[in-house]
Image: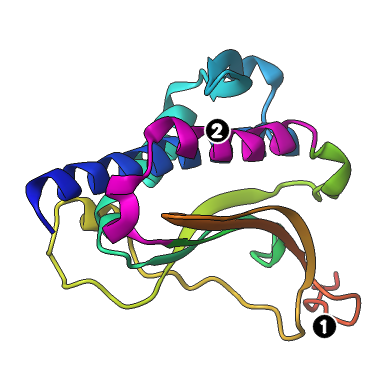
Amino acid sequence: MNQKDANHSGEVGRTLVEFLEVAITMIVYVKGLYPSAAFERRRYMNVVVQRASHPELRDYIHSAASGLLPFIEKGLVERVAVIFYSKDNVPVERFIFKLTINLSSAASVEEGHLEFALRSFLVKLSVSKSLVKPLPHHCRWEVTAYLRSLPEVGSSKESELWIPTDTKQWQKPAVITPVKSLDSEPLCLQLYLEHPSLSEPQPCQAQS
């Protein structure tokens, strides 16, 4: 890959990371975990979106998204998940971004074309409240990245922002609700919801 192609590949990676930061923020906003005052309306890719105005919330989302860049540039990222947990630390809902990015073809793609394609995901998220289920009380959430292979330890400063996860997995296949998909060059992207099956074993409840 020559320097020009590398620059174009970097632009695609940065555009995707910026998109994920905005999309994650919109998901958290739609879920209603925080007061509306914790967000402010902004325009991104000519779409009205939500931006976290609370410093700690904004910094967490920004660091999680920007920390993905070196892994995206290496083609290591398979899925990015926004996972909501019950107070028992059991996942109750997962927003999954499944992506395949062909950085070798990025040089032939105009940035405006990619932004136009990603814009449709933001529009869909802005009207997705009917797709999600109410969360139980005392929920928490996190951003989790699933990699195709493990990067070398200490291979980049950004990798230190990420730690191995001990996320609990459902024992039964998840119920999947498609939200939006893109199948193009250099990016194939799917957004879908995962909920536990009705037959999923429930965690044991402590009795007084």
Q: Is residue 68 visible?
A: no
Q: Position of residue 29 (x, y in %)?
A: 67, 31
| Mark 2 burial class by Cα count in 10 Å: few <14, some 14-19, many 20+ | few
Residue type at mark 1 is Pro
Checking the image for residue 62, the label placed there is none
Q: Position of residue 51 (x, y in %)?
A: 54, 22
What predominant SS class does the magenta segment belong to? helix
Where 132 falls versus 117 (above or below)? below
Label 1 sits on residue: 201
Residue appearing at x 62%, y 21% in the figure = 47
- Residue 71, by quadrant, is bottom left
Question: 26 or 179: which is nearer to us?
Answer: 179
Question: 182 or 59: which is nearer to us?
Answer: 182
Question: Is 38 colored magenta in this rendering?
Answer: no
Element class at badge 2: helix
> Which stretch is magenta?
101-127
The image quadrant where one finds the C terminus is bottom right
Q: Is residue 44 visible?
A: yes
Residue appearing at x 85%, y 47% in the figure = 131
Element class at badge 1: loop
Label 2 sits on residue: 116
2 vs 35, left or right, is: left
Mark toward the start of the polypeptide (1 vs 2)? 2
Residue appearing at x 32%, y 65% in the figure = 75
Question: Is 116 colored magenta in this rendering?
Answer: yes
Residue type at mark 2 is Phe
| Mark 1 to mark 2 CA distance (whole Å) | 42 Å
Foreground: disc 1 or disc 2: 2
